[in-house]
Image (spheres, coloured by chain):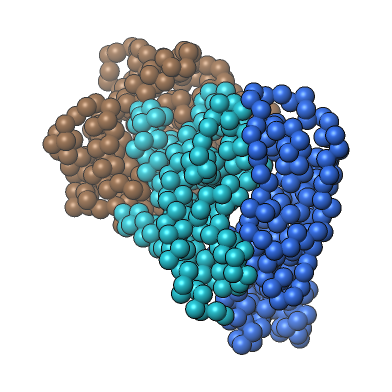
Chain colours: A brown, B cyan, C blue
Amino acid sequence: MPVKQQDKAMPNEQPFIDVRHAQKQFGELEVLKDISLQVQKGQIVAIIGPSGSGKSTLLRAINDLDPLTSGEVWLEDKQVNKKLPHRQYEKHINKVRQDIGMVFQHFNLFPHLTVRQNITLAPKMLKDIPDAEANKLAEEQLARVGLSDRIDFYPSQLSGGQKQRVAIARALAMKPKVMLFDEATSALDPELVEEVNLAMKALAAEHMTMLIVTHEMGFAESVCDRVLFMDEGVVVEEGPPGVIFKNPKSDRTRNFLRKHLGG
Amino acid sequence: MDFDLILRVYPFFLKAALVTIELAVLSISLGLACGALGAYARLSRTAVLRFIGATYVSVIRGTPALIQLFILYFGGPQVGIQLDAFSAGVIGLGINIGAYMTETMRGAIISVDKGQMEASRTLGMSRWQTMRKVILPQAARLMIRPLGVNINAQIKGTALVAAISVVELTYTAQRYIGSTYKPFEMFFLAGIIYMVIIYGAGVGVSWLDRRARIN
Amino acid sequence: MAPEWVFPGSTGGRGSIERFQYKHGGAEMGLDFSVVPEYFDQLLLGSFWTIAVMLVSAVISFFGGIILAVIALYAPAIIRYPFRAFSFVFMGTPLLLQLFLIYFGLIQIGIDLPAFVAGVIGLGLHFAVYNSDIIQAGILAVDKGQYEGARTLGLSKGQTIRKIIVPQAVRTVTPPIGNNMVALLKDSALVSVIGVTELTLSSQLAISNTFRPFEFYVAAAACYYVINLGLEFGLRRIELRIQAAR
């Protein structure tokens, strides 16, 4: 279904992220049904919907973590899920993933490494950055999320909100072009959610391209340029937050929002 | 209980204990190497390697260690492998315990949270880089205790080489039972020494385990 | 030339390990598996005795394990501690050593048992100790609340254990005990050293005629492997039965 873009003051016509006819099959179940989506550079897109709607699957298809059954994913001028023989595919996808940052619901920090090491591991290993520079990089990213004083702590010594912020810093250290958030605050105690939201808002203010799968309607409304409502593998409706949240066109959207609003 | 006898013969038992310890250390080292190789094979992307690994584990774990020793020591010459009893013991026991260690190591690697692999891959690291820096360090910590169980079993397993006439602890005990007709005393002596060795190994493993957890 | 082989049950009297160790005098060079079929029935009989040893030992180790576990958990301290010490010793020493102790030890105190009997007692005892460990853990793993709930209803200690705790423990305990049964099968090869003509010793007798250790030990290994497969199959079915009985 062709989708209307929101131009974000970018004269560039080529979409930054281009998902073409994404389809994902899990055995009998069709989780994604022919979804096409285009995101411009600097846009902040929220993806909402009930569990099982396919929103996480769609997000994870963008960096090919859950490969699509059919369809293409493009980042700028490169096809992310290019079909290549195994060795070449590995090289290709590892390179592409450096440009796509991802933050997980359960943080997935490396427990055996300090915060500093968590953040510097990939840059040192993949970009051959010398130690001193890597440390500086780690300090910068941590400052961005407000956790400079925890740099030599272990993940087990941090609260949930802190862990997630470290996860964000870790992803940012690779200087990605786009950030994907897979229900970043869903596993957090309510009082810890705000600090993560703040970090994400700061990123948004810096014009990072972001795709955010979330249950937090309030957050989506205040931060995002576009909202996609997904249900049963299709994008039911999409538009600016003002429209979607205040005046949705579809009944399904209306029903979903009625059940969920309060937050 | 004839303590006089025990006091008279214990030096021989201690000498034999050294052989037992040697056997244990060497075969456990070999076992760890085989275990690592086996785990690598079983977790490989190549189907052939996976098959070889699974076959190795299945055959070795499905047949008695004693038979494996006999095949190697008595049957070896037929296919050109001439080993002295001690070497045959080390190699046979090592290959044997390696199959069990393969499963221990594989289990530990698999039990590392799936999210770890996902996060690393998302950052752009390759499968092997992830293994080296993220999965294996965590798996190593998880393996120490179960490997300790394997090691414990292996120390007792060295007794099998008595059947191919290696003069270790059990062989010595049996020798003296035969000549002194005092099985309880000889069992007592050998038993205590085994338990001390096992206890010592256990302490070592616990220490390693604690050190690994400090991080 | 039909080899003479010893009926399991002969004692062989006292002696050092060499007396029972099969003397492998020189081997032929190269491999020739065609000699094996001649000795099929001998290997088959050996397998039969291996299975017999295994089954009898398994029964002993199973019930022995239960008895030892109950003693270790519920008996008064005077009895508990010696049994715990005994278990500790049996878990800390090699099976082969224990077999020697039982076989020759019994002779020393005047009981001259056939090798088969000594063998199954040794195996049974050894694995009874390991099983008891597992059973104790299984019983302790049953939630304390279960015990309390039963007692408050008026059930006695014994009734609670029998009707409430044990059935639940059985479910936890079945897989590890199954593993011990597999180990038992493989360790049964050790009783060949004290003269039981099970599979290992039978192959040695065949080797004494043909001087082909490789072929026959491999054949024996194959037999063990097959028996093992059967055992694992049986165990899995038992496990399924137990899991299903909810």
**Most foreground residue, A69 or B25:** B25
- Residue A71: percent from the left, percent from the top? 52, 16
In the image, is A10 to the left or to the right of C147? left
**Eyeballing the image, is B43 above or below C119?**
above
In the image, is C142 to the left or to the right of B150? right
Residue C229 visible in rendering: no
**Eyeballing the image, is C214 above or below C97?**
above
**Most foreground residue, A94 or C109:** C109
| Residue sitting at x 46%, y 29% | A65
| Residue sitting at x 34%, y 15% | A76
- Residue C97: percent from the left, percent from the top? 60, 61
Residue B48 visible in rendering: yes
| Residue sitting at x 59%, y 26% | B79
**Eyeballing the image, is C106 above or below A113?**
below
Q: In the figure, residue C173 lies in which quadrant?
A: bottom right
- Residue A84: percent from the left, percent from the top? 47, 12
**Most foreground residue, A5 or C190:** C190
Q: In the figure, residue C127 lies in which quadrant?
A: bottom right
In the image, is A74 to the left or to the right of C110? left
| Residue sitting at x 53%, y 32% | B82
Position of the N terminus of chain A, as image quadrant, is: top right
Q: In the figure, residue A87 lies in which quadrant?
A: top left
